[in-house]
Image (cartoon, grey):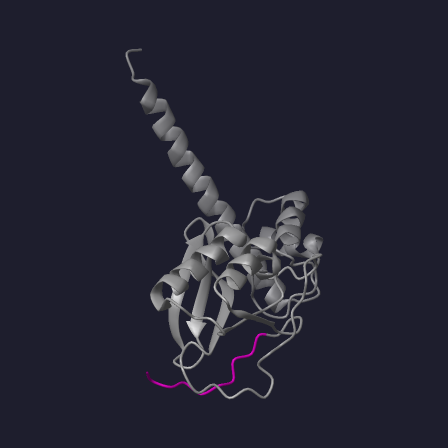
Amino acid sequence: MGLARSTYYYRSRQVSMEAKKEEADLRDRIEQIVVEFARYGYRRVTYQLRREGWEVNPKRVARIMREQSLQCQIKRRWVKTTDSDHGYRIYPNLLKGLEVRQRNQVWVADITYIRILTGFLYLAVVLDLFSRRVIGWALSEQIDAELTLAGLRMALEERGSVEGCIHHSDRGVQYACHAYVEALQAAGMRISMARKGNLMITQPQRAL
């Protein structure tokens, strides 16, 4: 027909983007339903979606709920960012009773997520607990050790020598894995981890 091959592939990419957006919108609505009706399983969620005009089948709804850990247990809207069921070493919490008096005394690292048009991006941040300033961060579609390592590397480049500084995080596999622990040890940092399901920052904000 005299058409360039790229014409077909361009249309395919457009269809793919629309499909990703539709999937993300559906996942978003499922989360909203489960937050509002915490005891709903995938069958009742499917029924509610169909009442609202969504053309979905139970298997698809069940898959999304399973992937996002939404099976009749969510109490607030969230995306799981911590996997503490692993075989790596868990370090003690070094922040109990500690008064933070200067910068580079304690760094706190955590992961959150950002909703975008076609899904989610994961954000890893490292902040100095004394000033509450973000000193390292990284964005990725994958929630893995490379994400947290990228944020840590930025913080280390920003601050330079931090030997003796406490690095505090949750017990997630991204912080407990060998690669991340080795990077902390190479920088001379002391490793601290919160108890399961708790990463509280209680020090008052201060200006540098």
In front of the other: 207 or 2: 207
How far across and how far down the image is residue 169, in percent?
56, 69
Residue 206: say if magenta. Answer: yes
Does residue 143 appear in the picture of this structure? no
Residue 16: say if magenta. Answer: no
The quadrant holding residue 152 is bottom left
Task: For the C terminus, give its image quadrant.
Answer: bottom left
In front of the other: 108 or 69: 108
- Left or right: 77, with 19 as reference point: right
Start-end of magenta stretch? 199-208
Q: Of helix, strand and loop, which mostly describes the magenta segment?
A: loop
**Vertically, is 203 above or below 55?**
below
**Vertically, is 190 above or below 51?**
below
How far across and how far down the image is residue 167, in percent?
52, 71
In front of the other: 22 or 159: 159
- Left or right: 86, with 53 as reference point: right
In front of the other: 78 or 53: 78
Q: How many labels does the image show?
A: 0
What residue is rendered at 65% in x and 57% in y?
69
Does residue 10 appear in the picture of this structure? yes
What residue is rendered at 67% in x and 43% in y?
59
How far across and how far down the image is residue 75, in percent?
63, 70
- Left or right: 193, with 163 as reference point: right
How far across and how far down the image is residue 27, in percent?
55, 53
**Vertically, is 105 above or below 32?**
below
What residue is rendered at 41% in x and 51% in y?
117
What residue is rendered at 54% in x and 63% in y?
185
Task: For the N terminus, give its image quadrant.
Answer: top left
